[in-house]
Structure formats: C-alpha cells, structure tokens
Image (tube, rainbow, N blue to C red):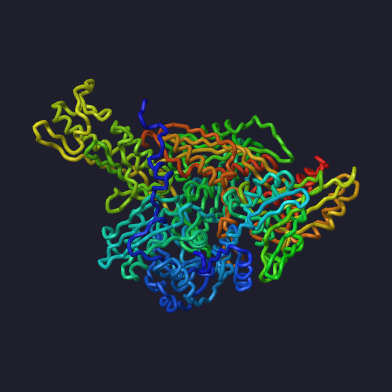
Amino acid sequence: MGYKYVGKGVPRVDAFEKITGMAKFVADMEVFAMLYGKFLRSPHAHARILSIDTKRAEKHPGVVAAITGQAFPYRMGLYVRDKMVLAKDKVRWAGEPVAAVAAESEESAEEAIELIDVKYEPLAPVFDVNEALKPGAPLLHEDLAQYEHSPVFTPVPGTNIANIFKIRKGDVEDGFKRARTIVENEFSMPQVSHGAMEPRACIAQYFQDGSTEVWTCAQSPFAVRYILSHALGMPLQKINVHVPHVGGGFGGKAGINFEPLAVLLSKFSGGRPVKLLLTREEEFTTAPLRQGFYASIKTGVDGDGKIIAEQMRYIYDAGAYADYGVNIGRAAGYSCTGPYEVPNIHCDSITAYTNHPYGTAYRGFGHLEFLWAIERQMDMVAHKIGVDPVEIRLRNALRPGSITATGEKLREDAGRVDQCIKAAAESIGWGKKEKQTCDGRLQGIGIAALWKAPAMPPNAASSAIIKFNEDGSANLSVGVTEIGQGTTTSLAQIAAEELSMSFEKIRVVPVRITDLTPYSWQTVASRNLFMEGRAVIAAARDAKEQILDMGAQALRVPKADLVLENEMVFPKGQPDKGIPLQQFAMGYTYPNGTAIGGPVIGRGGYVPRGLTYLDPETGQGFPALKWTFGAQAVKIEVDPETGEVKVLKVASAFDIGKAINPLLVRGQVYGGMLQSLSIGLMEGYVYNQAGVMLNSNFTDYKIARASDVPDEHVVTLIENPQSDGPYGARGIGELTMLSIPPAIAGAIFDATGVQMFKLPMTPESIWTTIKQQKPELLARKR
Amino acid sequence: MLPKFDYIAPKTIEETFELLDKHGQDARLLAGGTDLIVSLRARERIPKAVIDIKAMKELHDLSFDEKRGLSIGAAVTLNRLLHYDATSKHFPVLCEAVSTIGDYEIRNRATLTGNICNASPAADSAPALLVLEAAVNVASRKGRRSIPVREFFAGVKKTVLARGEMVTSINVPTPPKGSRGGYLKARRTVGEDLAVVGVGGLVTPSSKSSKTVRLAYASVAPTPVRALEAEKIFERDKPLDELLDQAMPIVSKTISPITDVRGGKEYRTNLVEVLTRRLLQRLWEAN
C-alpha cells in the first residue's frame, strides 16, 4: 500500500531543538525562589541507625531545612511498599540516603550535609544472591510480612525473597528421563548503571493547601503522580507533574526516583521549591540500577537436538528494595525459554533482596540477563551434541501456532524468529567462514536469538488528543515521553497519514503535564509505538468523523460519500467540489456567517485486549500484547595473549511488523547494539568487601565510546505485520540490545574454543579463561 | 561542587615563588586541571590556594634543537606538543605515549608537566620520558635545578619536589641517530582508558650487530619504572627471542604490580611480558 508518511524515514520532530541546544531539560531548569536539595549517604551496607543529629546542619548559613526519615515514616513502592523516602531505623546499602537538606545554594547544601552526625551500629550484610537465599542469611526486611504489596507478587516473610515467579508446564522430570543429552550450566552478570547523559533531576513545590507541582526527568509522569498520591496521601488532581525533554532514560527514570524527597524538602522549607540534581557519583551509588543476575539451567534434548525439558532457576539481585525488580523477575519467568518451544518447563524466577543498591527497570527488563544465560546454554547444547548453533536454534524456534511457556498459542500473525535467525546468519557470513588470523588474533562468529513482550499489567492504557488550530494545523498530545527514542515522531507520522494532512502541520506537544496531557500508563516496555499508535489512530479517526460530519452538512453530501484527503473535504471523485480542512478546524462557517459544529478535538484511547494475570502456581495465562522477535550475530577478533576483543561486524534482524520510521528504527538498533556491547564487554559494579562501590565514576566504570563502535552493522528489518498493531507495527526499543553479549560469547568460543559464563567479558576475564581452558593458545610460538 | 579556595594567576615566576613559599602544602599548581579538578571535586586534598601557571608566558615555550633536544614549558598542552613537528620526527615514543592520554578534548588542556607532577603510577608519558632520559627543570626562590626524570617520582602521587619548588619545563634530549621508540598500552576498552599496563621502549644500534635497549613501565609499581638491569641483557649479540627469555625474569623483579579495580596482579604481569615482547619485536626488525 502506498503511504505518504508511514514507512518513511522523516527526521525527528525534536531534531532542531536538540541540535541547537534549545531543548529544555530539568537538569537545566530553575524556578522562582528555588532551593537546592542534597542528601547524606550511608557509608555502611547494612547498619542500624542509632541516632541522627541535624542541629549543626540546620544552623549552617543558607540552610532552610534538614530532614531525616522521621519526617515521613511511611513506606512506599511500585509493587511492594518496602522503601522509605529516607532510611529510618536501618540502612540497607552503602549509598542509601539517610538525611537531606534544602539550602539557598548548592555549596551550602553540600557543606551542611557534612555537618549531620549519624551514629550507626553495623549489621552483617549479604551481597551474593545465593547467600541471601540460604536459611539464616541476614534479613534485609524483618517486617516483610507487614508490607503492603500488589497481589501479583509474593514476598516471602522471614526470607530475602521479594518475589518468586513459577512456570510449571508439562512434566519436566519425565522430559529429562526421555532426553538423549542433558546439559547443565550456571551463568551470571553484575549490576550495571544506565549511564544516561542527564542525571536524575527533579524540582518540587509543595503548597500550603496540599497541592504540589513537580518538574522531573521522569519517563512516566502519570506513574510519578500516582505513587506520590499514594505515598503522600494526596488526591491525584492536587498533584501536577511536568516532564520536558528527558536526557536519556533507559528504564532508570521509568518509575519514581527522588521526587518524593524533593516534595518533602519543599514542605519542610515552607513551600519553597527544591531542586535535586544528582552528581554522577550519586547516580552510581544511590540511584537505582540494572539488577545483577544468576542462573542455573538444565536442558534435556532428544536425538534431533529438540529441547524436550528445561529447568531454570533465575535469581535477580533486587538490592535493598523491590521497586521494578519483582516485575523484572516475573517478566523473565514468563519468557524464560527464550524464543523456543519447550514442552516441559520448570522455572523459578526469584527476585532476592541483598545489601546492594536497588535495581530497577533497564532497557530489556530482565531479558538481556536471562537471554545471556539461555542463549549461552543453547550454544553449549549445540556443541555437546555436535549441531550447528544456527541449526539448533531453527529446530527449536517458536513459530505461529507454537505454545509458549505460559501456554499461550502464538497467533497466526506472530513474528518469525526463524526468519530473523536466518537473516542475521546470512549477513554475518555463517557457514562461509574462513577462519582468519592476523598477528596472532583469532576471528570468530557467533549468533543469538531473542524475544520480548511488554511487561505490563493486562490493563495498561494509552491515549491521545489531536486538537486542531485555527489555521488547520493540529497539536498532537500524548502521554509517552520523549526520552530519545523518537516515538513521538512516528506518532506524528501516523496522525498525518490518518488525517491525510501535511506532517509539518502537526506539532507534537513537547512537554507532558499531567493536568493537561492525556493519560499513558508508562513510557516503558517497547509498548508506546504500538499502544499510543493505536490511540493516535483512534484520535485521528475521531477528528476525521467530526470534520466529515460538518462536511456532510456544508456540502449537502452524505457523510459516507465524502473523503478527507490532502487537507480537503470533498465528494468522492470530485476534489474540485471540496472545502479546505482549515475551514472546519474551529467549526464550519457558512458564507452568511452562520456556524455549525465546533473546534475539532479528536480523542482516542487504547487498552490491550484479552491479556490476563498469570496463575500464581503455574504461571499459565496470556501476558503478551505482542512478541517482537529478533536475532543478532557478531564477528569478532580476539587477542588471546591480552584477552582483548574487537567486535568487527554486527548483524541484527528483527521482525517488527512495520517500520513506521525506518531511520528511527535504525537509530534504535545502532544505539541498543552499542549499549549492549558495552554491558557484554566492560560494564559492571565493583565493590569492596564491605559493599562500597569502587568504580563510581566513568574513569573506572567503563562504558563504550565512539572508538568501540564496530566497523560494520548490517540491519535487516523484517515486516510480517501484526494485524492489530498500528499499520502492523510491533515494538523495537528494548529488543535492539538483547542478544549481543551471548553472540559475542559464541564468537569467542568459535575463535578460541573457550566458554564464557560471566559478564562482563573483560580482556582480563577472557585471558584468565583461556589460561584455564586452553593454555595451549598461550604457548609461545617461535 | 568544588571546595572553596583562593584562585591566583600570577604573571611572573617570582610572584609564583612567593605564593609557593607562603602557602607551602596548602597550595596546588594548576595547568590544564584535568587531574587537579577531578581530585578537588572528589575532595581528596583541599588546598587553600590554587595557583594557575598559565599566565606566565615563559612557561608556554616549546622549542627544539638537535643539540639541546626538546624543551617543553610547563604550560604547553599535550595537543600542542603532539602537533609540533619535531615531536613526531625525533620522539615517536613520546608521541605514541602522549596520544593515549585521555581523549582529544582532554589533551587540549592537559600538559606534559601536569602528567608527571600528578605522579600517577599510570602516567602514560612517564615511560616515554624515562627511556628518553628526560630532565625535569625545577625552580624555586632558592634557585634552579634539573632532576633526571628517573629520580623525580617518590611514590604513588608523590614527587621529590621540595616545598616552594615548581616544574618550569621538561627537557628531552634527542635520541641517538637510528634509534627507534614506541609505546604499547593495555586498556580495558578500545576507547580511552588509563593504562592497565604501559610499556615504553627505545632501541638504538650500538654497533653493527648489537643494540642498546631502554625499557620503562607504567601501572606496575608505585611509580613509573625503568628496567635498567634487564636492559643490560640486550647488549649481547643474540637473537631477540633469546634475549627476551633472559631479560623478562629480570623485568619481573623490577616491577611490583598490584590487584586493583583496573586489573589483577597476574594479568598485569602477563601484559608486561606480552607487550614488552611485541614492542621490542616491532622496534627490532626495522633496525
């Protein structure tokens, strides 16, 4: 079908603002009479707070308020209400805020923090998730039984289990009995930081009547408002949350961060607004991060390499608080097999408390973690039974009609992971490899597949408003925030296509203000192009109906015979008999001055259809609005003597249904690849024995830079449309980073014959592994 | 936020001497600031006075002549040094080492003098200056002296500078004709990083069949170190591989790598061996 805007790589609607520096971020903002907030961090990973003395801080010049956990001794949380705004009674990680001040200047606030005297009694900490789950381990939350929590989750009082999600499908014991080969392995990865360019920033002002204004770099303004309302006991309509441009989110700004602390500081400062802007060091030590992960997997395959039974134990390191972590464990649990059909499954996906900083959403929401494990396992099974890694994936790939781990029968128009695997393999040169070596460096290729559905409540909603202006242009308002992903540009393309009007005449309202903006559950989960896309289509059609209603009267032609095309309303086949769209924007006015209709405002909403909660004992049910499938392959070069790896080429393939804006899709694919390469090769929190982070800066917490970008990246976009997606589209944002690390590990095996089990695969860890598994590679050649 | 301090930018060196005498340990000198500002922000050591040396014209001098060698003023930035023709022509080891410090933007501000005065064991320029046998020119109200770079470092982040002294320039003698130098650095990413191990080498033909070799290392001891004992092995007329086999055990006695967040002791020891072999193989063949 010939579309005018859909499927075209139009430039981003916010390109000019961002390139010129016009775009406003909360980190840049100041409001009248603003104070600066600063918090004091716990030096201990686990300790009882014996006393906090803020008297000296209060007297420090410029200080307006100094508060402790006593100021607001109530628990809050996304799914489990386990966290206070400031630690009270005890601290649970080194970096947890224990007290805060608001002052006239940043300097004053920073100096005042040093004057707060806290007395602690250190408690035994627990850092390793497996240790945390052992009986007798130090408990993070002694009062877990008293915490309120969402009925979807199951914290286990008396343990460090924040949630346990189970899949029980078929008969796994019987499956293992019938298996020809059984492979068992353990895998892990550390916590990593989002590293967004804009650190967490917010400004809050609490008014005497209890109403509150918040400016924040949040991904989900409505989630911030909702949690603030519940935590502070204020009605929703008295809270107004503003979100301008956001300088990168990646999940780290998906829920609520430091907004409640800013509100409390404002309240205790007589209602003056208070800004909290984290330093990079605080981003590392105190802001939530990507959870650490441990997996043990047992896989049974038959003689044809078909998986017949699989038992997984996934443990996510929640750190001190549950936040999104419990839902990450749940999402990983229902996707636990990767994109493969497995008839017999036993999976426990546990989210465990430890004395680490707490985890939250991060692009991929648990999938990068378990795909690291399950795709590595796939390679090792293939190796054990002597089947090619591409072949074993194709033999087990989910296809339309296959049954997933939760018992969902994949729809007829489901995406095709087999096509993705073949495309990525083809692009990387699978099967044609001539092993090259250059100066002792060994080349190898690897591949891994992936899948993900949005992890969200079955009733997560989206909406859109298209409000026409006097000149026939229109403003598109949506609740999805612009965090760099470009969704709003694609939504404007959809609106322009539906209304058959010029893309340039649609302004995407660049700020989100909960008082004015239509509702969106959250900007997460690669859900917004699909769900906001559906809402925008509905809003556009609603506006079009209003325009055609007026057109029918004005032209005295039945509505069914009218078309709206190129900003004209006219009887089918007679564009010369039409009236310009602009003449209907504020209602239609006849030549004699009589008016009909009114200003055109289209509204549209969308909720997924037919999703269900999952059975608490078996995990069976229907969790997925859509599955996006993909595969990623890499070609690398390893220097065995130093362990250095260079990724030479990447091939990515995704079945995204329809690329509404192929340019933006590629942007996502390139960015996600590099973020994931970075996690695969270099990122990770490093602690000393007391649980204090040792690399809380970009000197020693390495992230990929421009020079780490591979020379070549072949992107294949496969478009098997999903019939209920907007123009057939599925989501892509998170998918782009899911399988690079296992593909690299596969390539390292191909190049050197060594198997990697832990991330990150640093030069040192690769060299160490070669020394253990293949010392002959290091024998000096003469 | 930075801690509070007095910022002073004296125009003359005499004024600077007075300030250094007055403030002693409470003063820090500022050139590019790429190390100092980071340490101030981390409140590692809070000075009362920060003395900016960039207002003194003579500290910006950069000159070369075959006899005197390369003279690099304390305020000369790394990029200016790298873009100076004589540097790449006569001092490739210095070029290679300096071009791995930070990234381009950092090198626009950072100085060679700052790199050695910071006295990090990981200073990339140090192995190059060590094998080139550079001299550090130091001045104070009491007078001037020249310190061989090999004697300049006193420990982690410590130099031998006495109270009231400052480095005014670094003098690098022109290496003998026919000598070849290079710097290899192991890092944690393809991108910019501090040295996990850095190796500088200079190979000079001393007769028809023998060579003199100079080797120095970063990030494997409390200070950058020169491997003087091991260097003697290479004076013998033997195939390089054989010489390396004899020299490497001696190198490993010179170094004392530790395990830290950037790398383990064992890995660093391995890198010293691998990089030394690679560097000398490269410098050897072309001679």
A210 left or right of A321 in image = left
Q: Is residue A98 above or below residue A594?
A: below
For the question of whether residue A167 can be seen, the reply is: no
Name the residue nearer the viewer: A138 or B95. Answer: B95
For the question of whether residue A304 can be seen, the reply is: yes
B123 left or right of A339 in image = right
Q: Is residue A369 above or below residue A440?
A: below
Q: Say which quadrant the N terminus of chain A sits in.
A: top left
Indicate the position of residue A219 as horizontal and vertical percent values: 40, 51
Indicate the position of residue A274 as horizontal and vertical percent values: 37, 64
Name the residue nearer the viewer: A309 or A246. Answer: A246
Q: Who's the residue at 49% across and 59% down the image?
A: A283
Name the residue nearer the viewer: A186 or A628. Answer: A628
Indicate the position of residue A538 as horizontal and vertical percent values: 28, 38
A686 left or right of A276 in image = right
Count how many numbered circles sit on residues in the image: 0
Q: Who's the residue at 30% across and 44% down the image?
A: A477
Name the residue nearer the viewer: A96 or B12. Answer: B12
Q: Who's the residue at 57% across and 70% down the image?
A: B47
Indicate the position of residue A282 as horizontal and vertical percent values: 50, 62
Q: Who's the residue at 40% across and 31% down the image?
A: A7
B66 left or right of B196 in image = right
Q: Say which quadrant the C terminus of chain A sits in.
A: top right
